[in-house]
Image (cartoon, helix red, strand yellow):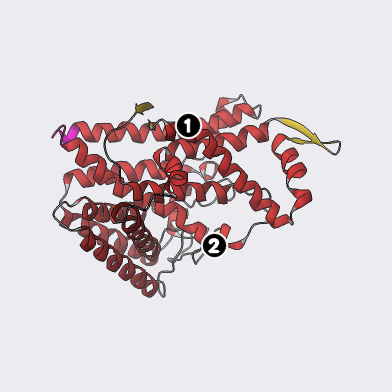
Amino acid sequence: MTTDLKVKQPRLLSLDVLRGGTMAAMILVNNPGDWAHVYPPLDHAEWNGCTPTDLIFPFFLFMVGVSIVFAMEKRLTQTEDHGKLIWHAFKRMITLLLINYGIHFFFSFLAGDFNIIDILRNLRIPGVLPRIAVVYFICTVIYLKTTPKTRVWLFVSALIGYFLIMTCIPVPGVGYANLNPETNLGAWLDRLVFGTNHLWRESHVWDPEGILGTIPAIATGLFGIRVGTWLKNKNMEDSKKINWMFVYGVLAVVLALLVDFFFPINKKLWTSSFVLYTGGLATVALALLYWLIDMNNYKRATPFFVTFGMNSITAYILADIVPGLLDAIPAHYNGKPTNLYGHLYQTLLVPFFTPVNASVAAAIALVFVIWLILYPLYKRNIIIKV
């Protein structure tokens, strides 16, 4: 990791706000006080469909694509060596992967499991951060080595190709193509490549961030690159950029709803309709923020979100570390053994709220705790880069 102090280059504030809001939402939905009491919009769809919570991950990947445009264009003014830029992106991918698996090792040791062989034997290989890392690297290579027209063709090919793969190729051992959790082609491939011990701990027979789903996830990144290219275009008026983004976003959502009839919107499979639906909504959201913040200079509410957005990966790591440490510290409540998190939750929240409101209050409290940790970095304009 490296740290930039007092960065002078202007940042796209609307992108930082959207990224920060997305990161804060991720912390909120991933850390309820009690998983048995969660408001439906703060939980994922069971299978097909899309809740507000299901928008968080694709929004982040969309912004990875937008950020690639701004980052690469800046670096291309400093060097025309694509190999050097690709090597930098590769190292960043590896760093993100090491951070992901390092967190797993850290909490395994914290829980008293010092057997590295056992940890490796049960290590989940796919995951949210690994998918972000891989999509970032592949999309960076695509951006540097292709034209905008080629990227459009790759985007369309990824969506159509994934649809044909998932709906037309028979699944070995099943005999027919299907979109069910445990028997779809992606689940079969994940078990074949990773084995059941290295998949999502709540299933072990399929993984929502599996291999095949990376194809449409890359398309989500390309969606962001397309929008980022518009925003970065100095020859286009801001008003025209906004109009194009709104039209593009709305058309993508409408198309997604049509595709949903034969290839359902589904986050866990990252279906092509899901790419269009979430990419369209992310485009509309960014267009609205760009109009409000960057064009009309409305910045009163931005500091809270920019605090998360400037150091989003740091926020992601803290969202694992802080609750994990609270869980690891032993404590007691009413004479029964628990952990510090459980003690604070039962003492400060449960007596004063209904179960579901106590659960969401705990999540909100964690968002503010992490914000307080990050705020000094924001005030000093410090960006921790990975």
Q: What residue range appears in magenta?
A: 77-83
Residue 198, given in percent of the width and then of the height, sits at: 51, 41
Say whether residue 268 is visible. no
* Number of the front mark, 1 or 2: 1
Toward which corner of the image does residue 325 lie, by quadrant?
top right
Horizontal placement of 249 versus 150: left or right?
right
Compared to residue 351, the image places residue 86 above or below, namely above
Residue at image point 56% right, 49% down: 28
Q: Which one is in front, 82 or 294?
A: 294
x, y percentage for residue 364? 60, 48
Residue at which label 2 appears: 45
Q: Which residue is mark 1?
A: 376
**Residue beneath the point at 31% across and 56% down:** 296
Q: Name, please, the residue furthest toward the top.
A: 114
The residue drawn where x is 21% and y is 50% is 232
> Is residue 78 shown in magenta?
yes
